[in-house]
Image (cartoon, rainbow, N blue to C red):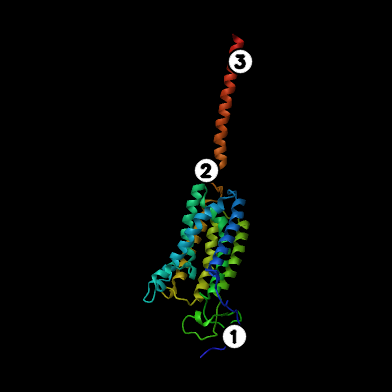
Amino acid sequence: MSAPVLAGIPSPSQGEWSLGPVPVRAYAIFILLGIVAAWWILDRRYTAKGGPKDAALDVAFWMVPFGIVGARIYHVFSSPDAYFGPDGDPVRALYIWQGGLGIWGAVALGAVGAWIGLRRRGLRMAPFADALAPGLLVAQAIGRLGNYFNQELYGRPTTLPWGLQIDDAHLVGDFASGTLFHPTFLYELVWNLAMAVVLVWAAKRFQLRHGRVFWLYVMLYTAGRVWIEYLRIDDAEIVLGLRLNVWTSLLIFLVALVAFVLIGRRTKDVPDSVWLPGRAPADDDAVTGTDDVSSDDVRKAEDEGLGSGAGEG
């Protein structure tokens, strides 16, 4: 028996289009838009910190592929039944375009890629992470629109006027046609954008440096993720009555809190250079300048010595 269709937020009728023989998926489009937005914000914030103008793009070429692979690995690990369960298909773990990315895998492996790119340029990780943090929240907000088009990862049934309509083909469980669900994609989108504003404000107001902006980002994001994750009804690993992602978020929140406090105590009066020791252009110029002055002094001394000798003769 179908439930009466209530007013609510309609879901898109499709999430994939064809450009000739090439399928174009909304999920991929929003992921790409999120990456571009994050890079745009990062580039401006990082150069304002004194970073090289081309560094953001250079590091992104390492960070983004690592992050995407990490995000997919985390998703498969946290939702294994769809790929390795009785009715699962391991090959589907490679179908990233169908959706399924885990933020903590993206952060962990993306950080490895960023570290590689930064080390190649002689740059420190902490200032880069601080510059990146607000852009990450904006990128995550944009990426949630991909879940909206895929009609996935929605929350529990609700009678609220902003409940989300879901097509019958995308219903999970035994819910009746016409049931409205919490639009968790929208909750996280709004939360992330709001926290991006809070992050930028806090960084300026409290002069946060040395990676503290990044760790504040982690705390703000996980705080929202806990209550949003609690609403979701899609398949997930359950540990002690809670979804695995809830436990993960709680643990990461505590780690971020400890890091935020300790870094604040230990770096209160420490300069926050973007460069690794000995890698700043000023250091190279100083060495080159010293060599040039020494050569000039030698030539001047030789000339004076020759002149003095001629006079005496």
Residue beneath disc 3: 307
Rounded to the nearest angstrom, the CA distance separating label 2 from label 3 is 42 Å
Rounded to the nearest angstrom, the CA distance separating label 2 from label 1 is 62 Å
Question: Residue 135 shows which numbered tag?
Answer: none
Question: Measured along the vertical axis of the image, is residue 94 above or below residue 275?
Answer: below
Which secondary structure, mark 2?
loop
- At 53% from the left and 64% from the top, the residue drawn is 219
Question: Residue 6 shows which numbered tag?
Answer: 1
The kind of residue on which mark 3 rests is: Gly
The kind of residue on which mark 1 rests is: Leu
Residue 1 point in image, percent of width and height: 51, 91
Count residues near mark 1 (Cα–Cα under 10 Å), then give few for <14, some for 14-19, many for 20+.
some
Which of the 4 image quadrants contains residue 140? bottom right
Which secondary structure, mark 1?
loop
Which secondary structure, mark 3?
helix
Q: Is residue 239 visible?
A: no
269 or 235: which is nearer to us?
235
Residue 141 point in image, percent of width and height: 57, 67
- At 58% from the left and 73% from the top, the residue drawn is 186
276 or 34: which is nearer to us?
34
Residue 107 point in image, percent of width and height: 49, 61
- At 61% from the left and 83% from the top, the residue drawn is 7
Residue 170 point in image, percent of width and height: 50, 79
Which of the 4 image quadrants contains residue 310? top right
Q: Which mark sits nearer the N-terminus, 2 or 3?
A: 2
The kind of residue on which mark 2 rests is: Arg
Quadrant of the image containing the C terminus: top right
Residue sticking out furthest to the top: 313
Count residues near mark 2 (Cα–Cα under 10 Å), then give few for <14, some for 14-19, many for 20+.
some
Q: Which mark sits nearer the N-terminus, 1 or 3?
A: 1
